[in-house]
Amino acid sequence: MCRHEADHQLTFAGRPASVGVLRDWVARHLRLGRHDYPARLTDDLVICASEMGTNAIRHSRSGLPGGVFTASMWQGPGCVCLEVRDMGPRPDTPSVPHISDSMSADFTCESGRGLGFVAALCDGRCGFTVPPNPRGHTVWCELRTPLA
């Protein structure tokens, strides 16, 4: 997990349209940042951001009226870390983030694969925190590229 001060941080409204804003925010900061990342890393992180932001809206209080989620990003030579923090479980359907054991068990399933997809894109350098008093979950991923 990324354990230093974020280079960039922004709070988003917990609405589906915010996921597109999150994707644009991630791509813009990678493009304008102090490191020259390959296009593939940018594309992969944008996909991860989309999955993580969507999960925050669909599965936490962040998606309820007045809800928000916060994204934080760190950029270093050869690596980028993204965290998305939500407002914790919904009262009616409490859940915690999890990575599915089987990505291919049911091809007709329309949900449940997002964090597995994130894990595949970042070679397993991802995870989540679930605080003892769940005021919010933090899901994170780190993507790396060979240094030039």
Image (cartoon, rainbow, N blue to C red):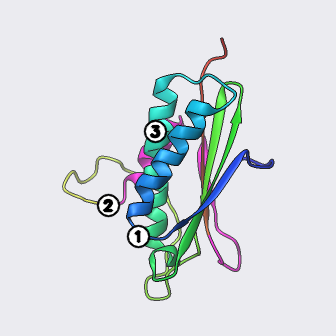
**Amino acid type shown at disc 1:** Arg
What is the number of the mark on residue 120?
3
Q: Which residue is rendered at x = 58% and y = 34% of the image?
A: 30
Image spot of residue 106 (x, y percent): 24, 54
Q: Quadrant of the C terminus?
A: top right
Image spot of residue 144 (x, y percent): 61, 29
Residue 55 picture quarter: bottom left
**Amino acid type shown at disc 2:** Ser
State which tag comes first along the sequence, 2 or 3: 2
State which tag comes first along the sequence, 1 or 3: 1
Q: Which residue is rendered at x = 65% and y = 31% of the image?
A: 79
Q: Nearer the viewer, residue 18 or 41?
A: 18
Q: Which residue is mark 1?
A: 58
Q: Which residue is rendered at x = 32% and y = 60% of the image?
A: 111
Q: Which residue is mark 2?
A: 111
Residue 141 picture quarter: top right
Q: What's the distance in space between the residues labelled 1 and 2, CA to CA?
A: 10 Å
